Image (cartoon, coloured by chain):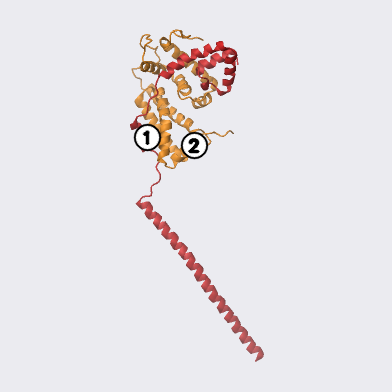
Chain colours: A red, B orange
Amino acid sequence: MKAERLHELADAYGADLRRWPASERAFAESLLAADPSLKAVLDEAATLDGLLNAAPAPVPSAALTARILADAPKRKARGRLGRAVWYLGAGWAAAACAGVVAGVGLTTHLSADARADAVLYQSSLTGVDDTEVLG
Amino acid sequence: MVAIVDPDEDLVRRVGQGDPAAAQTLVARKLPRILALAQRMLGDAAEAEDVAQEAMLKAWRQAPKWAPGKARFDTWLHRVALNLCYDRLRRRREIPTDTPPDRPDEGPAPDRGLLAAETGVRVDAALKRLPDRQREAIVLCHYQELSNIEAAALMEISVEALESLLSRGRRALRQALSDMAPAGSPRAGRGDGR
């Protein structure tokens, strides 16, 4: 970096190297270390920085802060209607579960009866056959 | 693509979930910055409050759908606030007022014993008289302490153009405030050095 670039950077960004482009800070520091007379460039810029810093930043009022916070996103509160919908949903879910259990039980019972009937029928058929064959 | 590290990411997520403590923290962290940005861009306290409130309301609406990794939340909020400031500055230009634009500084006569508050008033007045783009560059880089890359991106200009705006803005401020520079200062009372 040449001294001319140091002037350009100080004119644009001021005396505080933290405001300078990150890619040029190290070069600037090495240049200043090699030639301390260049520090006068930063001193020039520091004068205006000091004046700029004298302008105080506004402080947000409590009223402004409260107005803004009043509109902040809220957690979804479960109201009376929401609770009713939730209980209704839970009731339907319980009824559905009961239906499944009953259905499975009934199916098991019916299939067992059907199997027993089939066995009896087959054995009766066998009996007929035996009678016919054996006389 | 380089991943964007956003220090506000977790906070914004919690705000989006309706966490009141997170909302308070976000306001404490961002409102002073956004109010200062608006105040310095507009030079009007009441308008600055309106802009800050509107920007924060947009933040509340954005928080639940914020997609991390695309941009830093702080940069996005600056963009929102700057757009609101520009809307107001445009409206001012469309409705002429009695205030003449860009006139030379007519502040008090040189007085080395100026109080700090008075200095602040003079600096604010000089800043207000800068062309909008020069003021924006100085506000973003000096006061908001954004990097040159962030500031240039927000202003949608190149880094070289940003540097040019900064140099011209600071030069105009030096001229406007030359009577306030400490005695013996290299550029005190001097006009444009370059």
Q: Is residue A116 left or right of residue B19?
A: right
Q: Chain of mark 1?
A: A
Nearest the camera: A94 or A31? Answer: A31
Task: Identify the amino acid type marked 1.
Answer: Ile
Q: Does residue B126 appear in the picture of this structure?
A: yes
From the viewer's perspective, is residue A98 above or below residue A31?
below
Circle on res. B9 = 2
The location of residue B5, given as percent across then percent down, is: 53, 33
Q: Determine whether the residue tagged by mark 1 lies in a helix, strand or loop.
A: helix
Kind of residue at disc 2: Glu
Q: CA distance from mark 1 to mark 2?
A: 20 Å
Residue plotted at (41% across, 39% down): B21
- The part of the image, by quadrant, that contains residue A27 is top right
Q: Are marks 1 and 2 in contact (CB under 8 Å)?
A: no
In the rendered image, residues at marks 1 and 2 fall on the same chain: no
Q: Residue at x 41, y 30 (%)?
A: B31
Please, what secondary structure does the residue beneath circle 2 have? helix
* Residue drawn at 41 percent across, 37 percent down: B23
In the rendered image, residue A20, in percent from the top left (x then y), is placed at: 53, 21
Judging by the rendered image, the residue that carries numbered circle 1 is A68
Residue B126, position as x, y percentages in the image? 40, 16
Residue A126 vs residue A14, the one in the foreground = A14
Residue A67 horizontal/vertical position (percent): 35, 34
